[in-house]
Amino acid sequence: MNSRWMQWFLVLLLAATLNLSPSLSGAATPEKKPAKGEEYGTSHFKNFTADHSKFDALKQEFKSGPEVTKACLSCHTEAGQQFQKTLHWRWKSPADPDGKIGKAGLVVNNYCISILSNEPRCTSCHTGYGWKDKTFDFAAQEKIDCLVCHEQTGTYEKFPTAAGNPVSEPTLFPMENKTYNPPEWNKVAQSVGLPTRKNCGTCHFFGGGGEGVKHGDLDSSMFKPNRALDVHMAMEGENFNCTRCHTTEKHMVSGRHYNVSATEDRRSLLESDIIKRITCVSCHTEKPHKPGVKANDHTDKVACQTCHIPEFARVNSTKMSWDWSKAGERQDGKPIKKMQDGRPVYDGMKGVFRWEKNVKPEYYWYNGVMRNVLLTDKIDPGKVTKLNYPEGNVQDPKSRIYPFKVHNGKGPYDKVHKTMVVPKIFGPKGSGAYWGDYDWKTAITKGMEYAGLPFSGEFDFTETQYMFQTTHMVAPKEKSVSCTECHTANGRLANLAGFYMPGRDSNRALNVIGWGSVIVALIVVLGHGAGRFVSRRRREKKNEQRDDE
Amino acid sequence: MSNAMTNEECALESIYLYTRFERFWHWVQAAFVVLLGLTGYEIHAGFTLFGFKRAVEWHNILGISWLVLYAFIVFWHLTTGQWKYYIPTTKMLFRVILYYAVGIFRGEPHPVPKSERVKHNPLQRLTYLAISVFLIPYQMVTGLLYYMYNSWPEMGITALSLSTIAFLHMAGAFALLVFLVVHVYMTTTGHSLTAHIKAMCSGYEEVPVQQK
């Protein structure tokens, strides 16, 4: 209300016009080069109290990851059991007692569909060593991979198909045509520190098995972003680490997962300085704009991301669709691969892909909870199945309009049971895996058998969708979405119904009656005027005649 | 017939009808109607003229400015006694209507010529009174409610929806636009096409010499 009285005051002073000047002062972030060792985010080394290279426990000779982990746990006594409760370890939502929600549970996606029976490939991104199948011992603390998140040499790599293990001797990965080297265990172990963008990005920028496959707002461009790409993480600016917002307690990294929203707490640090900094509101408050700016009135219905992330995939393209049904084309037994603009558009192993750059998000009401279709849920193959979808609606005070990347897919389903199915995709020739033998029926049979789920033997492909809330790549404010892009007939929010939005909505009858009245008035006055003109001419003529007489 | 003086031929004299403040508020309100109409329609229909953001800002500032001016206008009317010129009357009303419907085409003189005593004919009195006392305040109330949409919960307003208030405000805007069309046309009905416009600029209205 204050701002309103302020505006009144300005008007009274007849100084109102001053208020019209654009308020884009432009954030004058001083151009500065990141300090050495800070190219992946602010390093904690300038503020640490323990130099791990001086610890005897880390000077012993290591030959494997688990040996390093034991050394870590010898001092960090609680870290093991803390970490084993997290989503990063379990790949199941800690909030789901049934263990169904999660990659290791029964959720299905548009990418490699499910990890079940495909573990060795997928778990190259697991924070552990050796999760090759369901016999993996999740209670074994030495199986935790501390290094992938904490090492700071940038040399530590896990082999893409080795169930989370690094190699023990140099090994070529033919798909990438890249040789992976065994880690220098002592060097990496002694380098440990708090995670930087390099640590998190090693997995999260390549989700789905490659850069930009899953998220449109997380890819390798975010390792070293500039201000145009992300105002917070920009190297020349604040150089945020991921954990600057994803605040972490006892190894539990804050953030949204499945049906658990990132936080329910909408307080700012001014109200409590121990809150998680996971939301924009934490630092920017609920009224982030200058007093009197209309955008402040939007924060109860529109998420910050909606205006401040005008497009995602602004540097590298992101995968927008994946059609498994076209997979299988091979030449001389080898899968065909077609590239376009540096990205695969066809892969005999995987099908047809579509990539896009500078993508405008789609918008949905969202309260922080995503719902997932499970392998046991019935689907309608005649419709596009939303394998996950945001929960929320216009009436819900917790919901706001959020931007999403919507990825379209086409994947296998059981024609009789009307469920999505998990095919065994990864495995050598003769294992029944699709990438070994290229037979869908066998692959699905193997996958469903592994998952302990029924398969009728009849399958087809159905259209699916998978959504990612877009929250990274926050653009500079001068690039934010302008009012007109939504407040117009066919704008960005054209698909959202159930509320009145000026500029987009209007009452048709009122428009017709209103303009109709104006037109009638115009016709009447023009007719009246014409009548006056004609009658006057006639009178003048008459007068002339009379004068002539 | 031949000695009947028509409107077009009669002798004219100048009388000072519209004071400086009256002319000021008239033209400022005219500007308000036009600018509020343009910015308002941009907000309503989403076409691009000023840009939605600027249209909203201008519309808010213009609207509030009008409220302030309106307060001054009311004060002026009350203190100067000018309000008396707007007392509605039905006397001669029918004659005036008949004049605009028929007489004007015959070149007959206006049945209620302007004078210091009669600034507005009965039809004008009714119209201007209705506009000033009903339509403009109606637009102010609906406009203010629209403007304060985000404070409705604090104000205890729960029964109203944004679409309703937008509808009401827009309906008022159309009514003003209809008035504007007719009003502008009526300025051409003086002894010359621009006589009334000139009068509203200079303050001097040229009226037929009254036979006393």
Image (spheres, coloured by chain):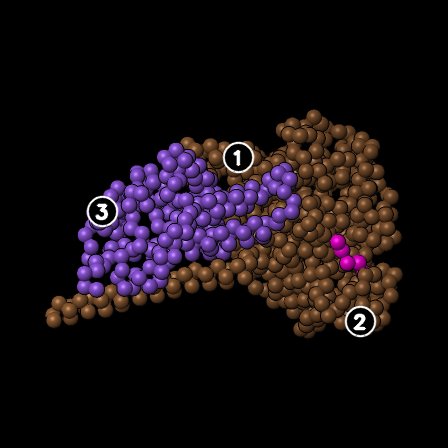
Q: Quadrant of the C terminus of chain A?
A: bottom left
The residue stretch that appears in magenta: A371-375
Pointer 2 residue = A415
Question: In front here: A337 or A532?
Answer: A532
Element carrying mark 2: loop
- Above or below, comparing residue A119 to residue B15 in the picture: below
Camera-side mark, 2 or 3: 3
The residue depicted at 22 percent of the width and 49 percent of the height is: B211
Label 1: how many residues lie within 10 Å, few (<14), some (14-19) or many (20+)? few
Residue A179 on the magenta span: no
Provide residue A272's location: percent of width, then percent of height: 68, 30
**Colour of chain A in the rendered structure image:** brown
Mark 2–mark 3 CB contact (< 8 Å): no
| Callout 3 and callout 1 share a chain | no
Tag 1: residue type? Ser
Pointer 3 residue = B212
Toward the front, the furthest residue is B212
Mark 3–mark 1 CB contact (< 8 Å): no
Tag 3: residue type? Lys
Q: Marks 2 and 1, how far apart in space?
A: 60 Å
**Colour of chain B in the rendered structure image:** purple
The residue depicted at 76 percent of the width and 71 percent of the height is: A460
Camera-side mark, 2 or 1: 1
Label 2: how many residues lie within 10 Å, few (<14), some (14-19) or many (20+)? some
Residue A505 visible in the displayed image: yes
- Above or below, comparing residue A161 to residue A383 in the picture: above
Label disc, if present, on residue A3 of the rendered structure: 1
Mark 2–mark 1 CB contact (< 8 Å): no
Q: In the visual, does A307 lie left or right of B193?
A: right
Q: Marks 3 and 1, how far apart in space?
A: 60 Å
Residue A372 on the magenta span: yes
